[in-house]
């Protein structure tokens, strides 16, 4: 069997594998055949001792002995060669052929010696034993029919001649029966040989197909692992410039004609952010590095947030976005992933609905809630409904429109639904619209909901407090500091862990930092997690909120303490502000 990653077997290599198996099977049965030959020789010598010329009997017995010794030597040579990976199958097949010819010759000679009128009924015993040999060897020598034909000829021709010239009563009748038996057994041997050959060939072909499948699977696994390693390594560096652009775009305060330009800049940043996040999210999902945090989720509040988020886009397209939900609906899910799924479905529905509207509905379905996204769009033909969940698949007009996305939304939806174990169904009619239905398990309102969901509902207000930003990228550090200062915070920045420790220790008791915002990947000895652990040992640490910002995958970072907030780059400003609002004192509403 070829090694995984090696070249596929050629026809010659496949034939060699089949020939090796045949040779191995022949030699595997050779010891049994040798024992039978010794027993046969002893029986004939005992039966015809004193009836056949002693010298002829001795010569025949010596010949059979020589054939037996030759067979034993061939078997021993094969056993030695079989332990080597590159043994010559043709060489050992020729050796087995010589053994077959020797045995066939001396068996045929026994038919000539022991079929004589003066031997009476004993001569028919000899014939029956030879016929038994002919029938018994079909199963073995059918593995290589030329050997069987040669053996059959060497064994039968002398006996047939003996029938013809003996002149014994019934000799011609016996000869005719013998010839009938030989003629009848040849087609049987041919059929048996074809079955054995085809079975062996099919087995080796299947084994080669399995090898190719294993090789292809390994290559796919290696490619997948290489892709995962690339995105894990590049995730941080890819997110850094997008993070800086997003912070700077947030700082822009346009007036007059510049408002439209700044809005377009922010839209482009959001598109770039969405594309990058989509690719990286798919990579993390495929690598199994995205995990779920299941809490009770307020579906009514979630539907309202989604309406506020997408009603502007719906209005810009001339569409109506409606939400239909009961007054109370709670489900067990991951609020972040669930919002991502519904958001992708809504964005997809808006893109492919030229007229009419989109409905987000929350409906009770027994022990579950059915979350439905219905549109009056172009619809999806049945033959394409499975394809829409693949990466980079876009249906509709053949021309590419950047506003229609790049075909990652539904691919992300499918993977997230599998992660959440929420069944997703699709119903659609071309020209009438599409309905996506997501089932989530219902639950009772909890005493405590998802902390991420509470943070997103925090009020927008000017903040007051001292924040220490630890970030090695200059653009991200400066843009983040300016944005935090605009929110009303006093912000100090540093580029590594050692400088952060110095800033912390230099702060007066009445001016200690209330929030430390640290990147995970930092230059020097300490990373972000280790810096936070070091700061926890300093005075004033218990009153501080530590936030770790990272662009890495979950499995790439050290164990994060449960009381440390974790934000993934690119961080949405509204998400960061909501988090800070929960730990810092707002001064007044904006």
Image: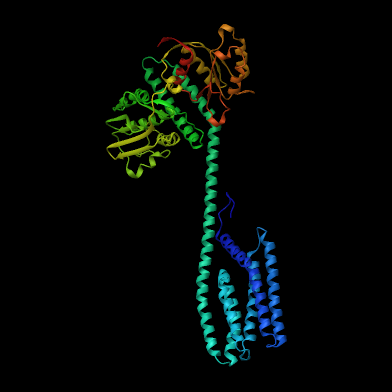
Residue drawn at x 66%, y 83% is: 47
**Viewer-side residue, 180 vs 263:** 180
Q: Is residue 347 left or right of residue 518?
A: left
**Viewer-side residue, 422 vs 309:** 422
Counting from the top left corner in percent of width and height, residue 314 is at 32, 27
Q: Is residue 465 left or right of residue 404?
A: right
Counting from the top left corner in percent of width and height, residue 366 is at 34, 33
Res. 396 visible in picture:
no
Assign the N terminus to one quadrant of the image: bottom right
**Viewer-side residue, 88 vs 459:** 459
Q: How is the image coloured?
A: rainbow
Q: Quadrant of residue 498?
A: top right
Counting from the top left corner in percent of width and height, residue 474 is at 55, 20
Q: Is residue 110 left or right of residue 388?
A: right
Assign the C terminus to one quadrant of the image: top left
Counting from the top left corner in percent of width and height, residue 504 is at 60, 13
Q: Quadrant of residue 40?
A: bottom right
> Is the residue 391 above or below the residue 178 in the image?
above
Residue drawn at x 53%, y 60% is: 203
């Amino acid at each position: 069997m070829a090694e995984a990653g090696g070249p596929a077997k050629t026809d010659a290599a496949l034939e060699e594998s089949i020939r090796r198996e045949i040779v191995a099977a022949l030699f595997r049965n050779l010891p049994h055949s040798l024992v039978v030959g010794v027993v046969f020789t002893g029986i004939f010598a005992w039966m015809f001792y004193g009836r056949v010329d002693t010298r002829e009997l001795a010569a025949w017995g010596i010949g059979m002995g020589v054939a037996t010794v030759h067979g034993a030597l061939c078997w021993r040579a094969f056993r030695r060669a079989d332990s080597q990976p590159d043994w010559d199958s043709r060489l050992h097949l020729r050796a087995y052929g010589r053994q077959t010819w020797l045995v066939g010759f001396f068996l045929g000679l026994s038919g000539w010696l022991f079929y004589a009128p003066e031997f009476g009924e004993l001569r028919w015993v000899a014939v029956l034993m030879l016929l038994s040999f002919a029938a018994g060897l079909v199963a073995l020598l059918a593995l290589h029919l030329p050997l069987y034909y040669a053996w059959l000829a060497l064994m039968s021709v002398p006996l047939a001649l003996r029938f013809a010239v003996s002149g014994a009563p019934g000799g011609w009748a016996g000869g005719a029966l013998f010839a009938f038996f030989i003629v009848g057994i040849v087609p049987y041997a041919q059929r048996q040989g074809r079955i054995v050959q085809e079975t062996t060939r099919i087995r080796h072909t299947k084994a080669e197909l399995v090898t190719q499948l294993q090789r292809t699977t390994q290559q796919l696994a290696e490619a997948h692992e290489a892709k995962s390693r690339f995105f894990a390594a590049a995730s941080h560096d890819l997110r850094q410039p997008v993070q800086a652009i997003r912070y700077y775009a947030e700082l822009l305060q346009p007036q007059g004609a510049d408002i439209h330009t700044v809005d377009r800049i922010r839209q482009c940043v959001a598109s770039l952010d969405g594309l990058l996040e989509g690719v990286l999210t798919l990579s993390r999902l495929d690598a199994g590095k995205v995990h779920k945090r299941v809490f009770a989720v307020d579906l009514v509040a979630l539907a309202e947030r989604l309406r506020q988020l997408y009603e502007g886009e719906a209005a810009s397209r001339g569409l109506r976005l409606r939400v239909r939900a009961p007054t109370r609906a709670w489900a067990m899910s991951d609020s972040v992933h669930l919002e991502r799924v519904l958001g992708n479905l809504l964005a997809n529905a808006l893109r492919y609905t030229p007229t009419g509207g989109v409905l987000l509905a929350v409906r009770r379905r027994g022990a579950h809630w059915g979350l439905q996204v219905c549109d009056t769009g172009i619809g999806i033909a049945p033959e394409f409904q499975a394809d829409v969940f693949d990466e980079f698949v876009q249906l509709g007009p053949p021309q590419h429109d950047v506003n229609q996305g790049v075909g990652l939304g539904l691919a992300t939806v499918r993977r997230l639904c599998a992660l959440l174990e929420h069944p997703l169904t699709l119903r659609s009619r071309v020209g009438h619209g599409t309905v996506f239905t997501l089932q989530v398990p219902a639950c009772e309102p909890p005493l405590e909901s998802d902390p991420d969901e509470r943070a997103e509902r925090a009020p927008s207000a000017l903040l007051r407090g001292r924040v220490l930003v630890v970030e090695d990228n200059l653009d991200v550090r400066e843009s983040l500091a300016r944005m935090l200062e605009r929110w009303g915070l006093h912000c100090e920045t540093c580029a590594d862990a050692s400088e952060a420790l110095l800033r912390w220790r230099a702060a007066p008791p009445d001016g200690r930092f209330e929030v430390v915002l640290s990147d995970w990947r930092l230059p020097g000895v300490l990373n972000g997690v280790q810096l936070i652990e070091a700061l926890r040992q300093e005075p004033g640490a218990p009153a501080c909120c530590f936030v770790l910002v990272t662009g890495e995958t979950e499995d790439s970072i050290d164990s994060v303490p449960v009381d440390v907030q974790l934000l993934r780059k690119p961080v949405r400003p509204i998400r960061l502000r909501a988090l800070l609002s929960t730990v810092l004192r707002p001064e007044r509403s904006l």
